[in-house]
Amino acid sequence: MARWVRRRDRAGRVLAIANQKRGVLARYGITREEADRAAWTIERDGRQSEGAVAMNRVMSQMGGSWSALARAYRLRPVAIAEEAVYRWFAGNRSRFHRFGVRPECNEADSDCE
């Protein structure tokens, strides 16, 4: 997800870091199990969010049409549906490798654990 965000956040509003980068989980107090389960956001004040909440927070910060998409999450039926889809995708993400969805740390020049 970090790569996805960096490619689309042309204004550089979001600091997106792959959770496999050396020391990043310890720095933010997230366990490997938590990182494998979901994407996370950490606010400047230390508040943390995960899953669809985190993704919508990121999109709202990216601006433009991404912000408009994130606003839909405020509607309870949309939020429930997004959470369900997110949990399904996260639990099945390895199936998407054949479509080019792969961990950033599979790259040869990565600084990963």
Image (tube, helix red, strand yellow):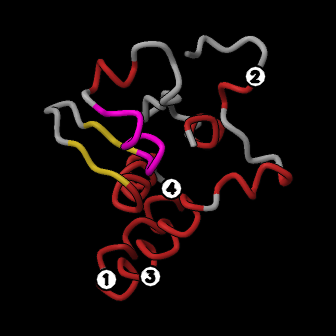
Mark 2 and mark 3 in contact (Cβ < 8 Å)?
Answer: no
- Tell whether 73 sits left or right of 48: right
Marks 3 and 2, how far apart at CA: 33 Å
Which one is closest to the eye, mark 2 or mark 4? 2
Marks 4 and 1, how far apart at CA: 19 Å
Which region shows up in magenta?
A: 30-39
Say which residue appears at 25% left-offset and 28% top-offset: 29
Give the mark nearer the N terminus: 1 vs 2: 1
Magenta-highlighted stretch: main secondary structure? Answer: helix
Say which residue appears at 51% left-offset and 58% top-offset: 66
Check disc 2 and give the amino acid type: Glu
Q: Is residue 57 above or below residue 45?
A: below
Residue placed furthest toward the left: 45
Task: Label 1: state its secondary structure.
Answer: loop
Residue on which the image places disc 3: 81
- Residue 82: x percent and y percent? 45, 74
Task: Label 3: state its secondary structure.
Answer: helix
Mark 4 and mark 3 in contact (Cβ < 8 Å)?
Answer: no
Name the image quarter holding residue 48.
top left
Residue on which the image places disc 2: 107
Residue placed furthest toward the right: 98
Quadrant the C terminus occupies: top right
